[in-house]
Amino acid sequence: MNKLIATLIAGLFATSVFAQTPATPATPATPATKADAKVMKADAKEAKETVKAEEKVEKATADAEADKATAAAKAKKAKAKAHKKAAKAKAAAKSEKAQAAIDAKTEAAK
């Protein structure tokens, strides 16, 4: 219990440190030459394309997860339906068996 409380307090201190540090905006360095400017522009373009590619991958992953969830829900529904049918058939068979036993007793009593 003491370790848990100590861990929680340490976590609160850690989050308060991150909450107090101001976010420093990234200032682009001023290029010294035209070649440096082209390199920086190419790097920025590459970073932008990388972000787009990552977004596409994340979207595809999200779509796949949604499809997986839909398939799981459908499978669960089908399983429940099959279970319900089996229970119904089992109840009908049990009823027929009970009726047969009653009929057999009435026949034996005659």
Image (spheres, rainbow, N blue to C red):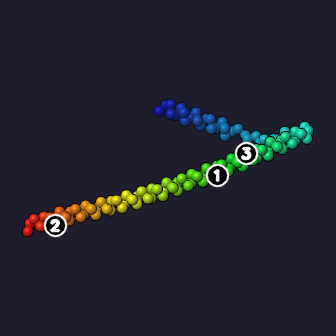
* Residue for point 22% across, 62% down: 97
| x and y percentages locating residue 2 in the rendered image | 49, 31
Q: Secondary structure at mark 2?
A: helix
- Please name the residue that numbered disc 3 is placed on: 50
Q: Which mark identifies residue 103?
A: 2
- Please name the residue that numbered disc 1 is placed on: 59
| x and y percentages locating residue 57 in the rendered image | 65, 48
Q: Earlier in the sequence, mark 2 or mark 1?
A: 1
Q: Earlier in the sequence, mark 1 or mark 3?
A: 3
Q: CA distance from mark 3 to mark 2?
A: 79 Å
Tag 3: Cα neighbours inside 10 Å, few (<14), some, or many (≥20)?
A: few
Q: Secondary structure at mark 3?
A: helix
Q: Amino acid at mark 3?
A: Thr
Q: Could you say which is closer to the camera, residue 82 or residue 40?
A: 82
Q: Amino acid at mark 2?
A: Asp
Q: Is residue 30 visible?
A: no
Q: CA distance from mark 2 to mark 1?
A: 65 Å
